[in-house]
Amino acid sequence: MNPEPALQESELRQPGSVPTSRFFEIDGVRLHVQVTGSGPALLCVHGTGAATPTWRLLLPELSRHRTIIAPDLPGHGLSSTAAPAATTPAAVARLLAKLLDALELQAGAAMGHSAGAVVIAQMQLDQLLDADRLIFLNPAMLTPLGAHWGSFRMLAGLLANSTLVTTAVAGLASDQNTVTRLLAGIGTHLDGEGQSAYRRLFSDPAHVTGTLKLMASWKLETLASRLSELDGDVLVISGARDVAVPQREINRLRIRLPQARYVELAEVGHLAHEEAPERVLELILPVL
């Protein structure tokens, strides 16, 4: 079973804003989404291995200005897993577009972290999203690990189909020290609350399986070749200490996506919005 939500509705409650945790059955996937705030809609898409708790430090302020739509990707958090064919960037983009239809909301702005940035870029390019403002946090837009990425995806696919492996990984993640080391491995240092949220997520074998399935399906070559076609106001925020998406990848992205504005945050790793939420808010609120 999936764990209890690491982000409780009470944590999002703001004056005049009643958050809801809702579920929709779409294309065989039971999608969980948090909706809170008021005003024009902002779609927030988390990255691989995360879930709605990743936005916990931004939502209270953002919900004062926008209606926030924060889904759990397939196999992540409280959303059920999906078949491999439904976890490619294009398939996830279609799934979230149908979620917006089910909510009867149109997002004029979108924010994505890491793989979540890929999803909202795919939605915009495929005309499934008509946003005039796009915010990419630590975006994993280009093929990670260079020539080794193909082999890594194959390994992730094999591991995702092994109950023994995913259960073992979940068992290891129940130790807070293990989670601390994993986060440090991507250049990230979180407070106790943040580390606890990730421990709860990765202690669940279903979440581990969903993470591996998504990684196994992540082919980015076609998307990378289309990035120059993105329209709207694009802001890219990266962390100088990010190991998962290092600055050399951001420099490659500048070539593919020259129309964007780039901001690098010093002393910040892969989870910029969780490590330095005040600094990220200072950058994104004027955009919104």
Image (cartoon, grey):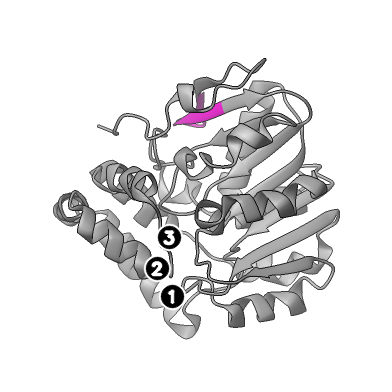
What residue is shown at x 43% (from left), y 60% (from top)?
Answer: 215
* Residue 119 visible from this viewpoint: no
Q: Are marks 2 and 1 in contact (CB under 8 Å)?
A: yes
Q: Is residue 6 above or below residue 251?
A: above
> Any mark on residue 215, and which?
3
> Rounded to the nearest whole Å, what is the CA distance between mark 3 and mark 2?
6 Å
Please tell me which of labels 3 and 2 falls first in the chain. 2
Question: Seen in the image, is 267 located left or right of residue 110?
Answer: left
Q: What element carries label 2?
A: helix
Please tell me which of labels 3 and 1 falls first in the chain. 1
> Rounded to the nearest whole Å, what is the CA distance between mark 2 and mark 1?
5 Å
Q: Name the residue that disc number 2 marks.
A: 153
Query: Mark 2: which amino acid?
Result: Arg
Q: What residue span does the magenta drawing correspond to?
A: 24-34
Query: Mark 3: which amino acid?
Result: Met
What residue is shown at x 81% (from left), y 59% (from top)?
Answer: 230
What residue is shown at x 37% (from left), y 35% (from top)?
Answer: 6
> Any mark on residue 204, and which?
none
User: Image quadrant of residue 14?
Assistant: top right
Q: Name the residue that disc number 1 marks.
A: 150
* Residue 200 visible from this viewpoint: yes
In magenta segment, residue 220: no
Q: Which of 219 and 274 is in front in this view?
A: 274
- Position of the C terminus by quadrant: top right
Q: What element carries label 3?
A: helix
Query: Mark 1: which amino acid?
Result: Gly
- Mark nearer the viewer, 3 or 1: 3
What residue is shown at x 29% (from left), y 60% (from top)?
Answer: 180
Q: Are marks 3 and 2 in contact (CB under 8 Å)?
A: yes
